[in-house]
Image (cartoon, coloured by chain):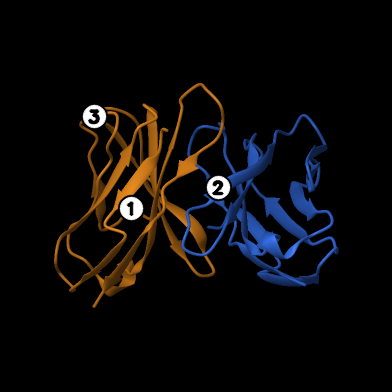
Amino acid sequence: QQQVKQSPQSLIVQKGGIPIINCAYENTAFDYFPWYQQFPGKGPALLIAIRPDVSEKKEGRFTISFNKSAKQFSLHIMDSQPGDSATYFCAASIDGAQKLVFGQGTRLTINP
Amino acid sequence: DAEITQSPRHKITETGRQVTLACHQTWNHNNMFWYRQDLGHGLRLIHYSYGVQDTNKGEVSDGYSVSRSNTEDLPLTLESAASSQTSVYFCASSEAGGEDTQYFGPGTRLTVL
């Protein structure tokens, strides 16, 4: 049972474009929604995270938009760069420090 | 600097053999997790521990076991390796009651022939 569904599976964007990755969840008990970035051969690393008491969070060029009523959240990357090319995972948990449920991942390619 | 390490980084084994993957963290985190990563499935939780002597089953625990005898280590054992367990395995840790971040190790690529 996939509790967090992520789309698209892959995404190609030109440099400077704004890739958007979407996730939907089922469990209304989730209260922590992180995004992880993974480069080839490396472990995932936390990029940005949000709790459901806010609708948007920005850190640098990365923004999470959160829609509690729709049970959806998304990652936007402003002014995307080739160095942003990586696999991105959304996730959710009931307690931030506890076990995470991950989406299927999105392989993002930013072309120069 | 504090870190989380995994060993070996690559392992090839045969069907039916017992395999143990090591995970060691120096953050003194109470929480530790094992995930497997497969194309199209993201990362799926295998087992997790919230402290010494505490272990819990995750979403895909069949064929795997863990033990937690100290804070720093959570070894993952495949009792009798199967080809379906060919995957990349990641260990992670986080601080109970502290910041939310789970820190991941570099991963172990396991191939079962």
Question: Which chain letter matches label 3?
Answer: B
The residue identified by callout 1 is B61
In this rendered view, identify the residue nearer to me: B91 or A84.
Answer: A84
In this rendered view, identify the residue nearer to me: A16 or B34.
Answer: A16
2 vs 1, front mark: 2
The residue identified by callout 3 is B70
The residue identified by callout 2 is A45
In this rendered view, identify the residue nearer to me: B109 or B112.
Answer: B109
Q: Residue furthest top?
A: B97
Label 3 element class? loop
Residue depicted at x 38% and y 37%? B32
Amino acid beneath label 2: Ala
Residues under labels 2 and 3: Cα distance? 25 Å
Q: Position of residue B66 (x, y in %)?
A: 25, 44
Residues under labels 2 and 1: Cα distance? 24 Å
Residues under labels 3 and 1: Cα distance? 21 Å
2 vs 3, front mark: 2
Q: Is residue A34 above or below residue B14?
A: above
Sooner in the amino-acid sequence: mark 3 or mark 1: 1
Residue depicted at x 58% and y 62%? A104
What color is chain B drawn in?
Answer: orange
Amino acid beneath label 3: Asn
Chain letter, colour blue in render: A
Q: Position of residue B37 (x, y in %)?
A: 45, 61
